[in-house]
Image (cartoon, rainbow, N blue to C red):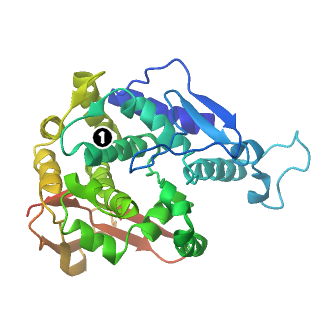
């Protein structure tokens, strides 16, 4: 676990993002403590600067040994093998990522790295603040977070049942990702974002619908930036904004300018996602797979040809992914991000 944390913090530090506090403290709090704030967003209050508040029914009393299987050591002095240790570490990481009540440690510490040091101004402030918070969480952990106080209202109980069912079919333990897929990726949310620009999402009559729109479009913008730049360069992008506007405010134009410095194609894409109501629409016409002549060393080589186009008026980035091998032994590969114009 120390190695996992060290690797992630080293990557963030190398990108130029600096943690401004001396410590990061986990604080156990009573279950009944209110964990959401005011305003229409009702955002989490469990992540103040340099802290994360953990409910006493969560990590402080959690059990992880049953995840390892029968080979878990029966005494406290027992030693886990590498496979067991990695499985236990992944379960702990997944546990923190899976706190949908505002106690996600990665989303929490991400606020101290960025959100608690600067602020967004202008009509795009709410959506832009959300997108950059999601991007910071991705840089720190590789996963997005999810929190909405409204989801705990009785009328959304059936959605939680669907979420629980979807969790059983997911093998990677990405709880927040399953939550986003279940609660947000729905036809009515897609219809809303196709008719409402990002700076207007907070004006919806239904606050939960506004939050859904933020997760779907602003959150996917963060994912696109992360995928297209990679974690290190995405961190450099955030660090550049922070250096120029620490303890102050910035606007969408400042973010677009920072994007242009990182990549000539990134700035226009960010602008389009905020100014337009559309999204890119990638279509694959055909894919052809060929075996080529063997190399001089006798290795077999192949070529994959894919015809990819964007049928919508909004530019974006796409990857081509493919799997080699059989069901028992396969490896999945992804291309570098490809910029596809409007």
Total marks placed: 1
Residue at the far right: name it. Answer: 75
- Residue at 86% across, 50% down: 73
Could you tell me which quadrant the N terminus lies in? top right
Q: Position of residue 147 (x, y in %)?
A: 48, 53
- Provide the secondary structure element on which disc 1 rests: helix
Q: Position of residue 87 (x, y in %)?
A: 66, 53
Q: Position of residue 256 (x, y in %)?
A: 14, 41
Q: For this view, does 42 lie left or right of residue 229?
A: right
Residue sitting nearer the eye, 119 or 64: 119
Residue sitting nearer the eye, 3 or 264: 264
Residue at the far top: name it. Answer: 22
Question: In this rendering, does residue 305 appear at all?
Answer: yes
Q: For this view, does 237 lie left or right of residue 69?
A: left
Q: What residue does disc 1 label?
A: 234
Q: For this view, does 124 lie left or right of residue 133?
A: left
- Residue at 8% across, 64% down: 342
Report crowding for label 1: few under 14, some 14 to 19, many 20 or more residues within 10 A (C-alpha). many
Res. 100 image quadrant: bottom right
Please determine whether, in this image, residue 341 is positioned above or below residue 92: below
- Residue at 25% across, 51% down: 228
């Amino acid at each position: 676990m120390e190695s996992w944390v060290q690797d992630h913090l080293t990557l963030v530090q190398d990108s130029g993002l600096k943690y401004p506090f001396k410590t990061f403290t986990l604080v156990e709090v009573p279950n009944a403590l209110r964990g959401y704030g005011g305003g229409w967003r009702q955002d989490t209050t469990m992540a103040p600067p340099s802290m994360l508040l953990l409910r006493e029914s969560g990590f402080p009393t959690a059990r992880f040994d049953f995840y390892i299987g029968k080979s878990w050591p029966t005494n406290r002095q027992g030693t886990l093998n590498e496979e067991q240790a990695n499985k236990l570490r992944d379960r702990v990481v997944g546990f923190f990522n899976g706190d949908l009540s505002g106690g996600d440690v990665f989303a929490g510490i991400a606020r101290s790295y960025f959100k608690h040091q600067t602020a967004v101004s202008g009509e795009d402030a709410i959506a832009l603040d959300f997108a950059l918070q999601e991007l910071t969480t991705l840089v720190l952990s590789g996963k997005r977070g999810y929190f909405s106080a409204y989801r705990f209202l009785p009328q959304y109980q059936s959605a939680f049942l669907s979420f629980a069912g979807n969790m059983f079919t997911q093998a990677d333990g990405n709880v927040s990702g399953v939550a986003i897929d279940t609660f947000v990726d729905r036809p009515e949310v897609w219809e809303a974002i196709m008719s409402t620009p990002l700076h207007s999402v907070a004006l919806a009559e239904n606050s939960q619908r506004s939050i859904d729109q933020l997760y779907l479009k602003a959150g996917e913008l963060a994912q696109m930036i992360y995928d297209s730049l990679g974690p290190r360069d995405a961190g450099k992008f955030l660090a550049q904004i922070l250096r120029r506007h620490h303890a102050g405010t910035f606007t969408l134009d400042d973010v677009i300018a920072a994007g242009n410095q990182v990549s000539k194609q990134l700035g226009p894409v960010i602008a389009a996602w905020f100014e337009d109501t559309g999204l890119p629409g990638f279509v694959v016409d055909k894919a052809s797979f060929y075996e080529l002549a063997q190399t001089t060393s006798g290795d077999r080589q192949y070529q994959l040809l894919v015809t990819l186009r964007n049928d919508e008026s909004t530019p974006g980035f796409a990857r081509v992914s493919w799997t080699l091998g059989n069901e028992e032994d396969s490896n999945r590969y992804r291309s570098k991000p490809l910029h596809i114009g409007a």
